[in-house]
Amino acid sequence: MAEQSTKTGKTISHLTAPLLVLFVFGAMHLSRFLLARMESGDLLLSISLVQVLVLVVPCMLYYLLRKRKLATPMLLSPVGLRHFWLILFSALTFVSGSLLIKFFFRFLSDTTVEMKGFFDALSGNLEDPSFAGVLLSLVIVPAVCEEVLFRGVLLAEYRALGDWNAILITALCFAMLHFSVENFLAYLFAGVLLGMVTVVSRSIIPAVLLHLLSNALNVFASDQFLRITLLKNGSFFVGFLLAVLFGLSLFFFLYCVEHLFFRYAEEPSETTLPPRNREGISKTFLSPTFLLLIVVFLLITAFQ
């Protein structure tokens, strides 16, 4: 009886979880349409409120509709000193990898990839925005709200079908939510890394911290660092330096991942482990609701 209930939970999660993202897609577009017609004085506060309503409230309703029984527990554990090196090297991997992707786009196509949030374009309508307002609405609030949705609820749902399946599906949904074909690879990379950090640390707190770092760099630094560095040092040197930094950061990040998994093997903190990923591939990526989500993403990006 318990086994049948578990299987039913898996079936429900892979069908209903994409519907949650689909609802967020629609709400994001409707809210952006409304915010574009607001006065600049209240825009930053409105952006913050909208993100809470569009990203967090649907998660809470979904959680209640699922009778507080996600496929696996939400990853809300506190982080300790043993996660310090994981967070540090994941941050270095995140920053160097994002810069490397921007470099290749700029080098190959003479365009710049800017990983801006969905509401960042509205900030152009602001007149003399305050630092605190920008920090709250475009850095802190989106980092927390998006991580609650993707690494909090969605990752918890899909982990029943395998950790790697959960990481990849949430990364795909994360990339699609920003509705940018040009920046899709950059967001996909970010989503995969954020998912890995969450699964390894068994907490969304490191992912929130990385997301805060990413948003802060994109809002306050944009691509100025890469542009100035290219002008001063040349493309080959900058590309080589970024590749070396990314390779070293990734090596030490994976070492931290391996080290933590060995510690978990000695003293596992979870009573049940997710199944092997191949058992859930078809349910994860061939779910009719997830395929519908892809169609909606393609239509939105084609006509926006």
Image: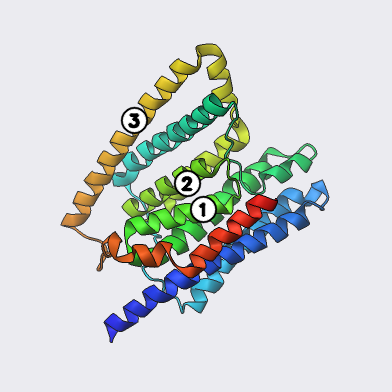
Q: Could you tell me if the residues under marks 2 and 1 are in contact, i.e. CB atoms within 8 Å?
A: yes
Q: Residue furthest left?
A: 266
Q: Residues within 10 Å of mark 1 (few under 14, many from 20)?
A: many
Q: Residues within 10 Å of mark 3 (few under 14, many from 20)?
A: some
Which residue does the numbered mark 1 point to in the structure image?
A: 174
Q: Percent x, y for residue 177?
A: 57, 54
- Secondary structure state at the residue bearing disc 1: helix
Q: Is residue 115 visible?
A: yes
| Residue at (58, 47) in percent of width and height | 140
Amino acid type assigned to the residue bearing label 3 in the image: Gly
Please tell me which of labels 3 and 1 falls first in the chain. 1
Colour scheme employed for the rendering of this structure: rainbow
Amino acid type assigned to the residue bearing label 2 in the image: Leu
Q: Nearer the viewer, residue 208 or 168?
A: 168
| Residue at (53, 18) in percent of width and height | 229
Establish if 38 lies above or below 91.
below
Q: Percent x, y for residue 266?
A: 16, 56
- Secondary structure state at the residue bearing disc 3: helix
Which residue does the numbered mark 3 point to in the structure image?
A: 247
Query: In which quadrant of the rendered image does the N terminus lie?
Result: bottom left
Q: Residue furthest bottom?
A: 1
| Total residue callouts | 3
Label 2 vs label 1: CA separation?
7 Å
Which residue does the numbered mark 2 point to in the structure image?
A: 188
Q: Nearer the viewer, residue 191 or 290?
A: 290
295 horizontally vs 99: left or right = right
| Residue at (67, 44) in percent of width and height | 120
The answer to which image quadrant residue 165 occupies is: bottom left
The answer to which image quadrant residue 21 occupies is: bottom right
- Secondary structure state at the residue bearing disc 2: helix
